[in-house]
């Protein structure tokens, strides 16, 4: 018995020697200290040969067992992060290397090819890794976003606008820098390492409804010239043209982006109006003739960037020029008023010129600490000229002429500081903006509006994890004030926020977001001027408006596997004393203005089902949605419900790509007005290479009439507007792109904040 026991002990000792040493550790994001799942951890011996390799679990932890004594080098790599190495000299026993921090550094990334797309859920964002098939099928950054099929996004193939499924504008960024649509179009899909989608942005992003951040690699010294040109073949009056150039030398980089969006099309408008006077009801039926809509929107950006290991300086000059000689509201129509017939001509021309200078500085303070500074100065010069006439044989015509010249100066300053704290990440910041406006109104009504407006915003936000629960909590405060003539106003709004994210399993995740925020009235709404709209109505500003507080809750659940993705989401929000329209009757005129009303409720629910039947080659998406609105005014209550769906089929093979999109009309109620968006469907087929690409698109091939509509529910002056165009029916568009590289490529990256001001503050009398 004794011999057997000795033999067993000897065997156990031998097994212990064979088992070898164990290496453990945790890999985290160096920016916010959140654990990184799926990180590659490779062990190399002293000869450089790979011995063992593992991937971190969902908590960012790894374990390499059965390692013999010796000297090793631990390689830690992850897409989108700078690699790290840990030396293990004379290993003789178990070792815990502790926390390994990986820094997000797109400037060191080379060519990345992902054969199977991946989605990584973090508390503050989703990280989407494009596949090689998605890159090959895309011509630009917006096209790549379409092919990524993010469930919560809706992309218009005509104007390339990006919105949430709830209809809100999405803030676009490149390497953390707020970017224009033209700058995103200028991106080459092969340079995009990953896309980060912030569905519920925290206080860090102000009041953005959602944020899409393209993380772009930084290459070696060299340059690039690229074009992305789209124009209509039937009709010829629609085009979007992008030209970009960049050149890099050592630590400096120069870039230029020019974009031009033009439209020259015909629309037909129908207006049905009722005016409820004290002693009668007047009914107007207005049938339009084809009326031209023409505009040119030009954006130019010139920037210089300097970056080393710790500092980054970016100086950007931007110039935005918008010229609309024929606006969407123009009418050339016949008005039927009982037995009487009138001729209506309504023309509005607008121009704006907005140059700005943006100086940005970023400093890496070490230890995961970073400091960001941004100062933007902007000058806005604008004009708005309107001529309206209502004529009838034998009756004195009604004419309205207004000419508005506006100028505005604004300065925006922002500072942000972030650092690791208590196993998580703390971000604090402050932002202040000051603007001075001087608008001169001439014509039928003369006035001079001078206004000063200030807004100050402070916030602190903390992100961390408790077991499997990721959380982000923040507190912010906003102060707004303005002065106009002898009037002044000041208001403070608290802005707390909470986000919780829990991965129930590897395939199922839950996310909850709640926040309280606020918004200020627009400068045009605050003006103390009135503008005649027509013979019956006046539009008037309201200097008594004050800032609004609103509350939002959203909940989403997602299930992802290789062949099916399902996401259910819902949002409820409430605006307290919102700025909504109000109609009164004064001096025999109906006055349309804005006032702080009682409240506004909105409920948005949607379900997205994505199917991938043949790996990355075919994707099918269907998103049914439901919207419910309740608008409580001071003297009205309106409700509206809207059911609809969005669907798409995408196919990709080698360099070929095809996409079929279909969207029903999306409705929004605000105040007393229901806006009914377009019903849109399209078929696009394209072929792309590394240096050039071509795509043909057919818009609305099965639509009898392409239209948009507005219903106003006022009890005093309700109306219904319909605008439709044959130019958008069976519309054929051709998109051509070219890329010319010289030298070795090196892109610009690293910037994290950006600010802009484009609100001219002009009150218009157009309908």
Image (cartoon, helix red, strand yellow):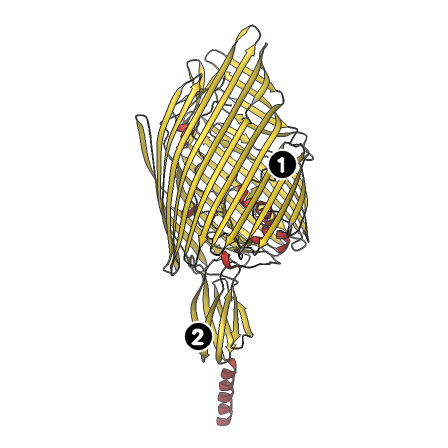
Decide: marks 2, 1 in contact (CB < 8 A)?
no
Q: Which mark is residue 158?
A: none
Compare residues 249 and 133 and report the one nearer the observer: 249
| Disc 1, SS | strand
For mark 2, what is the residue? Answer: 95
Identify the residue under disc 1.
Answer: 680
Q: Looking at the rendering, which quadrant does residue 345 occupy?
A: top right
- Marks 2/1: CA–CA distance: 60 Å
Q: Residue furthest top?
A: 394
State the residue in front, 483 or 109: 109
Point out residue 498 in the picture as x, y percentages from the top left corner: 41, 49
Q: Secondary structure at mark 2?
A: strand
Say which of 36 and 457 sits in front: 457
Image position, residue 18 (x, y; %): 52, 82
Q: Is residue 460 visible?
A: no
Question: In the image, 622: left or right of 478?
Answer: right
Q: Is residue 528 above or below residue 475?
A: above
């Amino acid at each position: 018995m004794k011999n057997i026991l000795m033999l067993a002990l000897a065997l156990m000792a031998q097994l212990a020697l064979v088992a070898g040493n164990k290496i453990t550790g945790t890999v985290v994001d160096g920016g916010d200290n959140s654990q990184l799942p799926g990180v590659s951890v490779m062990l190399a011996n002293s000869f450089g040969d790979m011995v063992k390799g593992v991937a971190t679990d969902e908590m960012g932890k790894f374990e390499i067992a059965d390692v013999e004594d010796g000297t090793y080098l631990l390689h830690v790599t992850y897409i989108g992060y700078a690699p790290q190495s840990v030396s293990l000299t004379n290993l003789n026993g178990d070792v815990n290397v502790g926390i390994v921090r990986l820094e997000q550094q797109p400037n060191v990334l080379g060519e990345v090819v992902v054969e199977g797309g991946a989605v990584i859920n973090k508390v503050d964002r989703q990280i989407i890794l494009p596949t090689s098939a998605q890159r090959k099928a895309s011509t630009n950054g917006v096209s790549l976003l379409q092919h990524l099929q993010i469930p919560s996004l809706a992309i218009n193939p005509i104007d390339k606008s990006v919105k949430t499924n709830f209809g809100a504008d999405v803030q676009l960024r490149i390497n953390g820098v707020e970017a224009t649509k033209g700058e995103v179009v200028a991106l080459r899909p092969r340079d995009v390492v990953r896309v980060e989608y912030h569905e519920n942005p925290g206080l860090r992003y102000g009041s953005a409804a959602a944020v899409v951040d393209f993380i772009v690699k930084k290459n070696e010294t060299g340059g690039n010239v690229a074009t992305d040109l789209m124009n209509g073949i039937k009709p010829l009056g629609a085009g979007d043209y992008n030209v970009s150039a960049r050149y890099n030398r050592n630590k400096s980089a120069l870039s230029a982006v020019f974009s031009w969006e033009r439209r020259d099309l015909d629309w037909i408008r129908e207006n049905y109006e009722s005016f409820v006077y004290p002693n009668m009801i007047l009914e107007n039926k207005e049938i339009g003739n084809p009326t031209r809509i023409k505009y040119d929107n030009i954006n130019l950006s010139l920037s210089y960037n300097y970056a080393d290991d710790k500092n980054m300086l970016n100086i950007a000059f931007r110039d935005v020029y918008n010229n609309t000689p024929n606006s969407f509201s123009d009418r050339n129509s016949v008005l039927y008023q009982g037995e009487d017939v009138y001729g209506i001509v309504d023309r509005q021309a607008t121009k704006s010129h907005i140059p700005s200078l943006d100086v940005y500085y970023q400093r890496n303070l070490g230890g995961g600490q970073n400091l960001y500074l941004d100062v933007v100065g902007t000058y806005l010069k604008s004009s708005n000229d309107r001529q309206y006439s209502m004529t009838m044989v034998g009756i004195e015509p009604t004419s309205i002429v207004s000419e508005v010249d506006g100028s505005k100066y604004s300065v925006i300053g922002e500072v942000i500081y972030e650092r690791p704290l208590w196993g998580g990440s703390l971000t604090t910041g402050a932002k202040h903006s000051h603007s001075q406006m001087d608008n001169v109104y001439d014509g039928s009504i003369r006035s001079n509006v001078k206004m000063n407006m200030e807004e100050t915003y402070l916030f602190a936000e903390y992100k961390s994890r408790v077991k499997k629960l990721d959380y982000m909590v923040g507190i912010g405060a906003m102060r707004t004030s303005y002065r106009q003539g002898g009037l002044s106003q000041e208001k403070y709004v608290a802005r707390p926020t909470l986000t919780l994210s829990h991965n129930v399993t590897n395939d199922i995740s839950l996310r909850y977001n709640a926040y309280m925020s606020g918004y200020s009235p627009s400068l045009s709404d605050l003006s103390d001027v009135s503008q005649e709209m027509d013979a019956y109505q006046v539009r008037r500003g309201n200097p008594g408006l004050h800032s609004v507080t609103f509350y939002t809750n959203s909940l989403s659940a997602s299930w992802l596997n290789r062949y099916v993705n399902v996401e259910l989401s819902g949002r409820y929000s409430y605006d307290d004393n919102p700025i909504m329209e109000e109609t009164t009757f004064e001096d025999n005129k109906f006055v349309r203005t804005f006032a702080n009303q009682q409240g506004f409720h909105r409920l948005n629910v949607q379900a997205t089902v994505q199917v991938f039947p043949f790996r990355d080659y075919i994707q099918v998406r269907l998103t049914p949605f439901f919207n419910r609105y309740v608008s409580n005014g001071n003297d009205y209550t309106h409700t509206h419900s809207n059911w609809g769906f969005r669907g798409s089929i995408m196919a990709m093979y080698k360099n070929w790509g095809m996409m079929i999109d279909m969207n029903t009309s999306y409705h929004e109620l605000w105040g007393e007005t229901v806006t009914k968006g377009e019903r849109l469907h399209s078929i696009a087929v394209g072929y792309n290479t590394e240096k050039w690409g071509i795509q043909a698109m057919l818009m609305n091939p099965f639509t009898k009439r392409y239209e948009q509509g507005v219903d106003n529910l006022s009890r005093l002056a309700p109306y219904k507007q319909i605008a439709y165009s044959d130019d958008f029916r069976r519309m054929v568009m051709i998109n051509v792109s070219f890329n010319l590289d010289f030298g070795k490529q090196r892109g610009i990256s690293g910037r994290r904040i950006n600010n802009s001001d484009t609100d001219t503050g002009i009150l218009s009398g157009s309908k």
